[in-house]
Image (tube, rainbow, N blue to C red):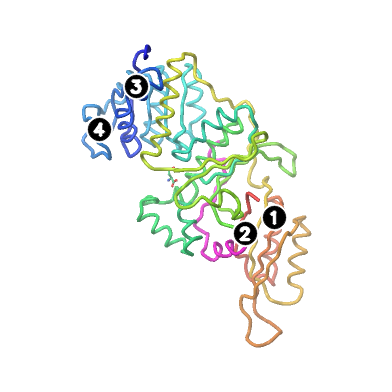
Amino acid sequence: MIAYRNLRVALLGAGSVGAQVATLLTEHHDELASRVGAGLDLIGIAVRDVDAPRTAPIDPALFTTDAMGLIESADIVIELMGGIEPARSYILHALNSGADVVTGNKALLAAHGPELQAAAEQVGAQVYYEAAVAGAIPIIRPLRESLAGDRVKRILGIVNGTTNFILDKMDVEGDTFENALAVATELGYAEADPTADIEGYDAAQKAAILARLAFHTEVPVEAVHREGITQITAAQVSQAQKAGYVVKLLAICERITDPASGVDGVSARVYPALIPRRHPLATVHGGKNAVFVEAEAAGDLMFYGAGAGGIETASAVLGDVVSAARRHVAGGPGVAETTHANLTILPIDSVSTRYQITLEVSDAPGVLARIASLFSEHGVSVEAVQQSIASVESGTSESSGTATLVIVTHVASERALSRTVADIADQQVVVRVESVLRVEGA
Ligand code: HSE
């Protein structure tokens, strides 16, 4: 039996996710009411243009252009308009009017998360944002609640579907980056301007959100080291495949200690990396997302699924709406997110990982020994070296051509590795440094 009054839900935005949220709230009204213990009444949808075409059939009477008026009448405000303003002002207004907020706005959370959390805390309200990272995949709630008694050591996330689609196509079909991007655009994975995805900005916003939650520390998005996938070539992907690796764009959030200063802190970074093909993340194909969490007590956990899509992301939004509504029914203030740990955000130079360095070198006596000595001088330990002859002048055993050296290191510091590579690049016998890729998840 439902004894509590119906809760008033306001929706801001009716794009592909918003339209699905409106439909599910309406169609599943009775079932949701039974789960919550109160009816969830969609009282209106604020949009810029009430007559714009929608991707789902919605009662036109729900549309309004008066967002502020709608917000003031609501118990729960769902913000799915995207962008920074006016979304930020609307959310602050909702919180200050006593409403809980559900948002999928990763850009806003990455840039203004602390401000929104502080505003919520002040009035005992809560901001829910499961849809902001990895679409339908439950990852915010597991980090905030299920793992609240554990300590997260590291998160490795494939949190951008567009880049995963591109890299997977390069891996499976031997495609070039340019062709794979063209297909991603044709199929609607990539936007007309794909910069946010392929340059890693989207993944960096998600990394900032995950790192903050996992390590109870403010992580400004500007502090996330970011490299995109535009420099990844078909040759690198094919060479990785032969060596038992796959290239993935990873968002990595990690507790680390700077090897030089001994300072404990947090690293948040996004870059294309090699992962062993036996790693669970290597099985994430196409436009799918996955987040691999390494926790001290729980061990390894992986969360997998759709990282985008209207109805898929609407599932995450609805889950948050139900959580917010249950809290209204149960009473009590929202659960504040704490940044008590206040750890230092360490730069990329503080990171230690493994590396694969590909060099084109003169195929002459002593070259390998010279390169090996440079690794040794910088304290970088080599795990494996593979050499193939790239080109030789025909028919003589006295080769005067070049060879390709693929060197994989043991764990080394980024600082030591970059000094090693700089010294290698200066050698006369080195024609060029073809690539330096980090190896993760080993
Ligand atoms: N553009 C994102 C992606 C989806 O390709 O995964 C929303 O974050």
> Quick one: SS at disc 2?
strand
Q: Amino acid at mark 1?
A: Leu
Q: For the residue labelled by badge 3, is the local secondary structure a helix, a strand or a loop?
A: strand
Count neighbours of disc 2 (C-alpha within 10 A) and say few if under 14, some if 14 to 19, many if 20 or more. some
User: Quadrant of the rendered structure where residue 135 is?
Assistant: top left
Residue holding disc 4: 58
Report if the CB atoms under discs 1 and 4 are less than 8 Å apart: no
Measuring from the top left, give residue 295's x and y in whole percent: 64, 36
Query: Spatial distance from mark 3 to mark 1, Cα to Cα?
Result: 56 Å
Q: Earlier in the sequence, mark 3 or mark 1?
A: 3
| Image side of residue 171 versus residue 325, left or right | right
Q: The disc labelled 4 sits on which kind of residue?
A: Ile
Residue 322 vs residue 123, the one in the foreground: 322
In the rendered image, which quarter is residue 314 located in?
top left
| Residue 188 locus on image (x, y percent) | 36, 51
Q: State the SS at label 1.
A: helix
Residue 262 % position (x, y):
75, 39
Task: Say which residue label 1 marks.
Answer: 417
Q: Are marks 2 and 4 in contact (CB under 8 Å)?
A: no
- Residue topped by disc 3: 40
- Is the residue under label 2 in contact with that under label 1 (CB below 8 Å)? yes
Residue marked by disc 2: 436
